[in-house]
Image: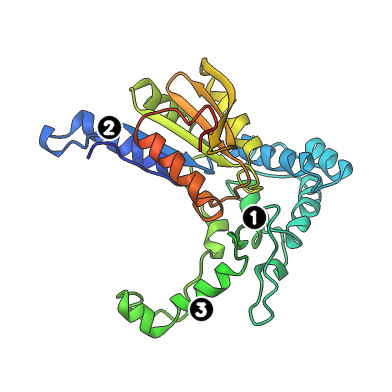
C-alpha cells in the first residue's frame, strides 16, 4: 500500500499499531505506511471540551453568563465534575436540543413521522472518563444536507431484507440497530489524549494531516486549534487561504510534520456537507501536495 489513508476518532491508535508493527514485525508483513488524516476527531479531552464551549460562545449559541459559569466551575483536565459544573453544562447542552450541534447552520429534522433525537432529554449520569460523555442524547444529532438522514437510515438498516442482503444481525438481536447508543457514556478505557501518539508519529516521519469542518460544534475548529497548539510544533507556513475554484475553500497552516486544513461551511461530516471540497482535500493529501493557494477556474 502506497499511502495508508485513515480517518476517524481512533486513527492515531490504529496508526501507532501499524507504525510499531512495521518496526518490529517481519519485513514481508510491513505496510508501506506514509501518512494519516484525522478529521473532526477527538484528540485531547481537555482542549476538545474547552474548545466546544468556547466555540459555542464565539458563535452566539450560548450566553455570556453560561460561558462564564462553565469557565468558572469546570476543570476539563479532571475526569469528575462538581455540582456547579454539572449545572452550568446542563445549560450549555440545553441549546443543542434546539439546534444541530454537528452542523450549526443547517436545519434540524422536523419529520413528524420520526422521533427526532433533539427531543431527547439531556441528563447527568455520574462520573465518566470524558466529562461530556455523561450528557446522553447530544451526540446523536443528525448531520448533512438532509437533517433527517439519521432517521431514514435507521429505518432502512433495520429492514429484514436489507439486513439479510448485508448478512447482518445473523444472531437476531432483540433490539433495533441505531447510530449511537448509551454505551458511549459507559466507556472507561479511552485514553484522555492521543497527542503523545501524534508526536511519536510525526517524529517517526509519518505525514499527518488534520482537517476540520468549520461549522461543526461537536469537535469544532476552536477545539482542534487548542489541541494542536499543545503539540508545540514549529510553524512552517502561516495561516493562509486555500481555494475551491474561484472561492475560498477554507484555511490551512503547516507545521513541521503536520498540516491543518479547515473546510469552510462544512459540519462534522465534511464529505456529506461539502463533497467537492472534501475530494480536493483528500486528493491533495494523497498526492502530498499543498491545498490550492490561489483561485482557479
* Residue linked to disc 2: 20
Who's the residue at 70% across and 73% down the image?
Answer: 110
Upstream in sequence: badge 2 or badge 3:
2
**Rendered location of residue 195, percent (x, y):** 49, 30
Residue at the far bottom in the pictured view: 160
Upstream in sequence: badge 1 or badge 2:
2
Secondary structure of the residue carrying tag 3 is helix
Secondary structure of the residue carrying tag 2 is helix
Tag nearer the camera, 1 or 2: 2
- Eyeballing the image, is 288 above or below 64? above
Who's the residue at 45% across and 79% down the image?
Answer: 158
* Residue linked to disc 3: 155
- State yes or no: discs 1 and 2 in contact (Cβ < 8 Å): no
- Closer to us: 188 or 21: 21
**Rendered location of residue 225, percent (x, y):** 61, 31
Upstream in sequence: badge 3 or badge 1:
1
* Residue linked to disc 1: 134
Q: CA distance from mark 3 to mark 1?
A: 27 Å
- State yes or no: discs 2 and 3 in contact (Cβ < 8 Å): no
- Closer to us: 77 or 196: 196
- The answer to whether residue 284 is visible is yes
**Image check: 140 left or right of 92?**
left
- The answer to whether residue 9 is visible is no
**Rendered location of residue 99, percent (x, y):** 73, 59
Amino acid at each position: 500500500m502506497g499511502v495508508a489513508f485513515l480517518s476517524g476518532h481512533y486513527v492515531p491508535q490504529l496508526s501507532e499499531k501499524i507504525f510499531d508493527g512495521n518496526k518490529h514485525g517481519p519485513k514481508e508483513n510491513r505496510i508501506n505506511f506514509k501518512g494519516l488524516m484525522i478529521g473532526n476527531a477527538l484528540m485531547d479531552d481537555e482542549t476538545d471540551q474547552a474548545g466546544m464551549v468556547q466555540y459555542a460562545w464565539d458563535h452566539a449559541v450560548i450566553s455570556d453568563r453560561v460561558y462564564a459559569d462553565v469557565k468558572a466551575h469546570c476543570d476539563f483536565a479532571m475526569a469528575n465534575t462538581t455540582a456547579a459544573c454539572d449545572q452550568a453544562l446542563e445549560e450549555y447542552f440545553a441549546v443543542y436540543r434546539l439546534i444541530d450541534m454537528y452542523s450549526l447552520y443547517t436545519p434540524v429534522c422536523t419529520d413528524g413521522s420520526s422521533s427526532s433525537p433533539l427531543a431527547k432529554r439531556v441528563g447527568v449520569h455520574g462520573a465518566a472518563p470524558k466529562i461530556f460523555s455523561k450528557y446522553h442524547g447530544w451526540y446523536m444529532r443528525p448531520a448533512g444536507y438532509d437533517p433527517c438522514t439519521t432517521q431514514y437510515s435507521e429505518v432502512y438498516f433495520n429492514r429484514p431484507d436489507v439486513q439479510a442482503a448485508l448478512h447482518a444481525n445473523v444472531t437476531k438481536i432483540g433490539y433495533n440497530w441505531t447510530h449511537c447508543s448509551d454505551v458511549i457514556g459507559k466507556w472507561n478505557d479511552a485514553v484522555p489524549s492521543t497527542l503523545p501518539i501524534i508526536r511519536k508519529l510525526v517524529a517517526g516521519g509519518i505525514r499527518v494531516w488534520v482537517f476540520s469542518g468549520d461549522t461543526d460544534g461537536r469537535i469544532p475548529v476552536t477545539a482542534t486549534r487548542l489541541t494542536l497548539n499543545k503539540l508545540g510544533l514549529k510553524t512552517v507556513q502561516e495561516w493562509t487561504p486555500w481555494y475551491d475554484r474561484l472561492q475560498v475553500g477554507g484555511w490551512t497552516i503547516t507545521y513541521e510534520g503536520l498540516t491543518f486544513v479547515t473546510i469552510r461551511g462544512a459540519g462534522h461530516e465534511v464529505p456529506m456537507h461539502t463533497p467537492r471540497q472534501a475530494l480536493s482535500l483528500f486528493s491533495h493529501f494523497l498526492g502530498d501536495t499543498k491545498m490550492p493557494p490561489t483561485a482557479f477556474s
